[in-house]
Amino acid sequence: MDLSQYSLVYNSLSFGIATFGAATAFFWLNRSQVDSRYRTAITISGIVTLVAFYHYFRMFESLGSAFEVKGAKVSETGVPFNDAYRYVDWLLTVPLLVTELILVMGLSAAETRSRVVSLGGAAVLMILLGYPGEVATDSGTRWLWWALSMVPFLYIVYTLYTGLGESISRQPEAAKGLIELARNVTIVSWCFYPIVFILPMIGIAAAGSINPYVQVGYTISDIIAKAGYGVLIYQIAVAKSAAHVDHAVAA
Amino acid sequence: MDLSQYSLVYNSLSFGIATFGAATAFFWLNRSQVDSRYRTAITISGIVTLVAFYHYFRMFESLGSAFEVKGAKVSETGVPFNDAYRYVDWLLTVPLLVTELILVMGLSAAETRSRVVSLGGAAVLMILLGYPGEVATDSGTRWLWWALSMVPFLYIVYTLYTGLGESISRQPEAAKGLIELARNVTIVSWCFYPIVFILPMIGIAAAGSINPYVQVGYTISDIIAKAGYGVLIYQIAVAKSAAHVDHAVAA
């Protein structure tokens, strides 16, 4: 990596720390602005960004140990950059992101539980299957685990479109559009990950100890899928809380 | 840099850390003093100062790594000072500053959303266009990006004066003057940035790895535009909350 690539990774990780810290403060402070039945979804939005804040802090520190900068020269110190932080982060946060969306829909307790178990379980499986490919250096192994990881990924996308689509039609009018948007943001932002994953396999970014384009790509995806998505969940909760109040006043 | 210039930058960054930490505590502790419809604006005021607190802390640490002081002698260590922290900070905080002003006006949900998107988007564009100029060393490149960055800047100023001016006339009497003041503080304090930016281009401050006048200029601008402005937003929220109470008592 040259200095400009190193600086790009360095500053994007720092941007992640600041964004996730800011998002956590927002969710937890403004949790009281929504009806109590949607507060668990907002609590979880803040937990997701706090976990991401922690892991971005660790990655920033890990980058600082792995490289030494003198003037315009960037050299490796020999201490490895710990890329596993991303997967440990996803293992915790991805099932929680699915849970946020299900909780803010306010389904019955039984439907909530069954959807959290099936979609959350598929999310865990998707991350576990992606990791052996991420740490592999040869393209064949990367493609194998990528393909295996795509199975639960496609199951999640399919379920979000069909199963959840049916539940969306039962939502209050004010929240319907926002929930559809949240579902589509989930699908589109999640699609970035398998695309970023294959960048080194199609020669756009060289495979190596640390790939600046992969790092920046994952960082942008994380910010949209966690902080941006959480703001959307918050807006759904605000819209649904207002719908309840209107309903109570009208009744 | 000689010792007095180094100390000036060092102490102004530390002053920034203390001010932004104090401002964050003020906004979040006193958030409960305003009506619930203005609390999101106060939450965001505190998020802006927390993000600035983080970046001033990072810049302070970066300055310490970039220079070594022995007696009256200041020498560079070879580790570069990371000036990008300012731009990463602005990328996050400037759209949020615009959002604060729009939220405290209490416009309709649709008008709020469209104004946040257009003014926030212009703010992001303004910061992104400024950065290539900031890191350039020759005056021609600096002027080019400065001029490009001034396009969204002027759009924001124009919109604050005309579009928002019309909405201000609909505000309650007690808050009208304060909102006008907040809008004018936004415009005047934001004008400092393009002026500080051109200091090295007009020979007032030498371009170099770190420019003490630019650093102190940006720090003063940040304190006015973030902490000072946030206090103004808080006062508007207090005045509007009192106007609601008066209205409720009179009804």
Image (tube, coloured by chain):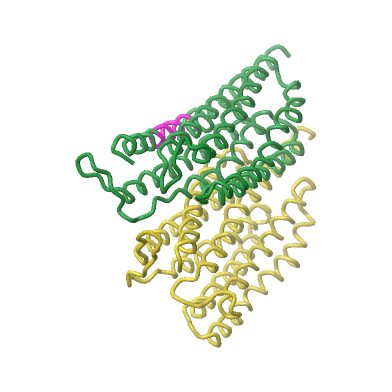
Chain colours: A yellow, B green
Q: Quadrant of the C terminus of chain A?
A: top right
In the image, A230 versus B77, the foreground residue is: B77
Looking at the image, which residue is at 55% across and 28% down? Answer: B229
**Main secondary structure found in the magenta portion:** helix
- Magenta stretch bounds: B16-27
Looking at the image, which residue is at 60% across and 33% down? Answer: B41
In the image, A106 versus A154, the foreground residue is: A154
Looking at the image, which residue is at 68% across and 32% down? Answer: B157
| Side of A192 relative to B20 (left or right) | right
Looking at the image, which residue is at 36% across and 36% down? Answer: B14
Q: Is residue A178 above or below residue A153?
A: above
Q: Is residue A132 magenta?
A: no
| Side of A187 relative to A74 (left or right) | right
| Residue A121 image point, x, y percent | 57, 70
Q: Is residue B77 above or below residue B156?
A: below
| Residue B176 image point, x, y percent | 68, 19
| Residue B52 image point, x, y percent | 47, 40
Q: Quadrant of residue B248?
A: top right
Q: How many marks?
A: 0
In the image, B235 versus A81, the foreground residue is: A81
